[in-house]
Amino acid sequence: MTGISREDVAHLGKLARIELGEAEIDQLTEQLGVILSAVARVQEIAGADVPGTSHPLPLVNVTRPDVTKASLTNEQALSGAPATDQERFKVPQILGEEA
Amino acid sequence: MSELVTKSAADLSELLGAGTISAVELTNAHYERINALDGKVHAFLYLDTEGALAQASKVDKARANGEKLSPLAGIPLGLKDIVVQEGVPTTCGSKILEGWRPPYDATVTTRLKDAGVVILGKTNCDEFAMGSSTENSAYGPTHNPWDLSRIPGGSGGGSSAALAAFFAPLAIGTDTGGSIRQPAAVTGTVGVKPTYGGVSRYGLVAFSSSLDQAGPCARTVLDAALLHEAIAGHDPMDATSINAPVPQVVAAAKMRDVKGMRIGVVKELGGEGYQAGVRQRFEESVAMLEELGAEIVEVSCPHFEYALPAYYLIAPSECSSNLARFDAMRFGLRVGDENGRSAEEVMNLTRDAGFGPEVKRRIILGTYALSSGYYDAYYGSAQKVRTLIMRDFDAAYQKVDVLVSPTSPTTAFKIGEKANDPIAMYLNDIATIPVNLAGNGGMSIPCGLAPEDGLPVGFQIISPAMKDDLMYRVGGALEAALNDKWGGSMISQIPALESALMTGGVA
């Protein structure tokens, strides 16, 4: 069994920006332990001489001519926003001071 | 039931072309059936009745004016709710996108519209395409039309169920680890994952970018090929789109000839862990291909047994990065924006409320696999396994033209049966995942009903990258031979939905 603790899962929740509840942390700790011990098998054959593959195709950089093209209008871009103000996205405070 | 809804897209295309039926009439026939029976199946999350009828009417007018139309003009289709369509709600089966109306079309959607295809609505799926049963949809599961107490596969269970229920002759799926092929297998339909890069990913809500691929779903191989050619081809909006001619899949589907082809049976994708009836129908189909003149060769791909663990590191890693865009700021759900909470606190609360258990599980797993100190052991090792799997494919293709296997190790299981056991659920995709890791093309076609439960079995055909025509050639030939043997298509044996009782999970 690969060791993953309750504290690890709580920390991962913070890294992933998910406010996990206590019951969720308990369940995830148990499930991730099982899943990790199953997937850790990849280490059995991942020799130092084997190069990694990140993508099925050999990727090349793709560029296009630097010309102006039509894009979303302000209205379209803001159409799905949870909150807007004066044609801008309105977000909660970002600096942590008192509102 | 209107006879129109059981016909293939190819047959309907002829009727439309000859003026025997109109696109509006055809669209209405499908909506009539959906409205009567989708309460039992739950294949659709949203019906765009107005948009579909407008498109159908436009096609009818164009035809009346003598305009040259694509073969799919006027044919109804279900669009998986992972693919965006301008102005039509796209949820990805998630609460975090509930009510979101995309301001643009995916390239797949644009091409469907340009071809005159009538998009009936958005089909249900596992949340962000993560799952093998459609039980992970935040809007409730889809039921398999063969047996409503069973799963229709996943993640594209809405698309596969829509086909089997005769709600549409065509559907679009997306396949990251088998989400087109496994649903096709368990519903007795046809599903194709094109070569990675063969169909644009622009406008597909990303799950795992190096694996995701959209593709055609249908009830016949020829219909899948017609849809394939309509959506495939280079797209400058997707940097991973292949800039090369689309393989001639329609011609290949019509060939019905496998003489002299070398077909490899993958030793590692079968045997233990595969249901007896699945093995039996698969072996019978292989024997049939041999009778048709193909040369059958057993090939070994020794690293395939590591594909599943590699996938469950690579896909969650990419997902943890891709799903960071759901931050409660620019679109989608926002909760807790009160009491002076910070943006970060609102983000954390929103993501906890908006994502379901499987999505959270994968984000957390991916975050772990990519975190400093574990990166080399997990994500790095999985990338090496990916190389070894690609080498296995390369070696196999030295000996054979295509590879075959059962698509899924079992027939459709009961709704709820594996819902609380992630590992058991992940095993559904054991035969489909290697194909995504290598970027090959893969197809599932029906190959019979398992004797022990009377449920559909899928036959998987795998072709080398950009040789998708080869799998269509095999699929078309095998389908024709099986239909001859059965005296009709397998889907025609499906029990009548009208009399089916609602059982199993509650939608």
Image (tube, coloured by chain):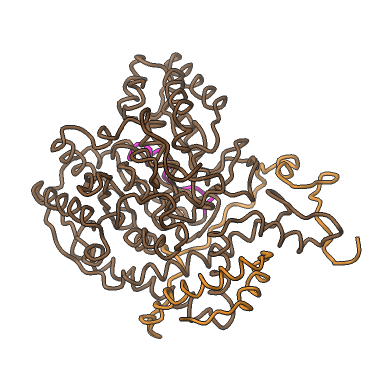
Q: Colour of chain B?
A: brown
Identified at 41% across, 60% down, the residue is B425
Q: Is residue A1 left or right of residue B475?
A: right
Closer-to-camera residue (B506/B482): B506
The stretch drawn in magenta includes residue A85:
no
Closer-to-camera residue (B273/B5): B273
Identified at 52% across, 57% down, the residue is B207
The stretch drawn in magenta includes residue B235:
yes
Please state the horizontal and vertical placement of residue B465, each as a whole percent of the image.
33, 57
Please state the horizontal and vertical placement of residue B285, each as a whole percent of the image.
16, 49
Residue that protrudes farthest toward the bottom in the picture? A48
Query: Above or below — where is A96 with respect to A84?
Result: below
Please state the horizontal and vertical placement of residue B272, each as a whole percent of the image.
24, 66
Identified at 41% across, 70% down, the residue is B310
Query: The chain shown in orange is which?
Result: A
Identified at 29% across, 39% down, the residue is B250
Q: Quadrant of residue B499?
A: top left
Query: Above or below — where is B505 with respect to B492?
Result: below
Please state the horizontal and vertical placement of residue B416, each as a whole percent of the image.
44, 52
Q: Is residue B82 left or right of residue B305?
A: right
The number of numbered badges drawn on the structure is 0
Q: Is residue B398 left or right of residue B109?
A: left
* Quadrant containing the N terminus of chain B in the rendered view: top left
Question: Which segment is the magenta one?
Answer: B225-238
